[in-house]
Image (tube, helix red, strand yellow):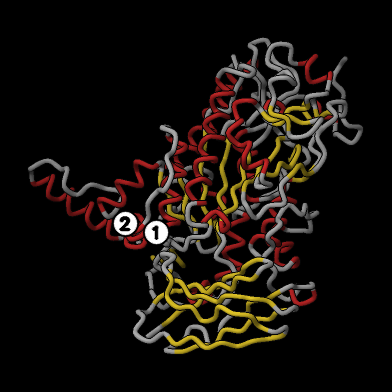
Amino acid sequence: MSCTCSPNTPSSARDLRRGSRLADGNAHILDHERWSRRAFLSQMGLAAAGVSFSLAGRPARAMTSSPLLKAFSSLASDRILILIQLSGGNDGLNTIIPVNNDIYYSRRPTIGIPKAQAVLLDDETGLHPAMASLNNLWGNGSMAVVHDTGYANATRSHFEGTVNLSTARNQDTSEESGWLGRYLTDEYFANGFSTLDYPLAVRIGGPATLFQSPFGNLSVTFGDAAQFERFVQQGGFFDAEDVPATVYGSALSFVRQITNASYRYVAAVQDAADLGSNLASYPNNGFASNLAVIARMLRGGLPTPLYTVSKGGFDTHSNQGAATGGHANNLGELADGISAFFEDLAQDGLDRRVMVMTFSEFGRTLIENGSRGTDHGAAAPMMLFSPGLRGGLYGVQSDLVNLYGGDPLYTTDYRSAYASLLDDWFGMSAGETDDVLGRRFDRLGFVEDKMQVGTEAAALPALFTLEQNYPNPFNPATEIAFHLDHPAAVSLRVFDLQGRLVQTLADRSFAAGRHVLSFHAGDLPSGTYLYRLETPRGLQSRRMVLVK
């Protein structure tokens, strides 16, 4: 059976872009060199300001009691989003397998995954057998798959694919800011520029463009777990002690000390590293180590809401393998790392605050090439993990008949996943989400534990509502209100950012209606605290700031 194109596909898009295939020779090599140079600069923090940012050319200073910190504390969410980039272009067809599609098997005679070896998600869909460690997450509803995400007129370029997924732009349009950079700007910079003493985003790999904003790049960047450890131990990225015992060495040490002192987030990251720990074992590889670092920072109380991690090796032009081989090894490391990460977080309930989503710059071709691999494609699945999910399969998997230049044709715009996260996980209003993404996209409804805030939340039926404390910031007392639509036994407790119980404000039954309780800080130190309302139908938490 010959490959066909969608009738709506422009003729120019039907031809594979030169450089997207191993057979393209030097054009393919040049394409990779361009992508690799950008990835190297990004990892080293040179492609965009990674650790600090500036306004009008002047470095920003950290202010513990800044307006931005107050804005952050007033948000209704203590939720975390972690994006995992499958760098190189993951083969979605061998990740989420169409186990009953004869076209899939006829076009992949050596690398197709037999149905009998796949981990079945339903009667039509299987998961690569190397990812069997995700069985528990799938079984308890903590895993979702969005089939064949993509966008129109994909060029199959590593560089352009990464930029598009980072900025949420349309192909052939210009956009300098990342979609998460715009989200952070909308949430925390609405009343002007300010700073805090901890980063709004942490990158351990992944594209820097994600967090680019009008105020600069809003992330701190670590190349890997080892660089994170050096940063924590040295108080910066540079060792001021390991220098030659010469005049030159003394000068070098001085420059390194000054440079380290310019990193605004050292204290916050060091404190989180000291307070945090891992409560489960992780596989012995770099990707799992990077996730372990994030778990440590979360448990240590770092308030950062956004993280990225990169897992490389998915550019499988040759000897890709099937149930075993290079691609299987990468998927196995991905699955085992994610499984260990959620096992770690579940030990003290941190997992309910966390959403993980995978993405790749593109998928791969339907047909395996002459080197028993696959070339650059278009559509690819996204996977999500969280106890807060409505687990399952979303979107429509490509029928492999209507194709895009030989690739699976995308059936869901990837920005629908972004919109669903902004709306339901972080609680932005639909209008704000549409502004961040540039226009309206369909919502997918995969978030079960929805955060309902903003102007639209009042119109939605709610079983219970926890309001923002008032005043906030406060000293020494504040009031916390909540509403019940039915009588219920509830508890209202205050915690510090290390998860330690500070005070129980209520642990009893309340009638339906609105209730107001007072919290007196007493001798507590200044800082950010969490208050959490637990009911038989769920829980909600918010932040408040004590300023003495």
Cβ–Cβ below 8 Å for labels 2 and 1? yes
Q: Is residue 20 above or below residue 386?
A: above
Residue underneath mark 1: 300
Instruction: Give percent across and percent down for residue 140.
Output: 66, 45
Q: Is residue 92 visible?
A: no
Q: Residue furthest right?
A: 7
Lateral position of residue 216 relative to residue 511, left or right: left
Q: Quadrant of residue 327?
A: top right
Who's the residue at 53% across and 45% down the image?
207
**Depth check: 66 or 171 in front?**
66
Residue underneath mark 2: 274
Which quarter of the rendered picture does the C terminus lie within?
A: bottom left
Q: Is residue 261 above or below residue 127?
A: below
Who's the residue at 65% across and 83% down the image?
510
Task: Give the amino acid type for the residue marked by disc 1 in the picture.
Answer: Gly
**Mark 2 to mark 1 CA distance (whole Å):** 7 Å
Question: Circle 1 sits in a helix, a strand or a loop, which is it?
Answer: loop
Task: Give the amino acid type for the residue marked by disc 2 in the picture.
Answer: Asp
Q: Quadrant of residue 363?
A: top right
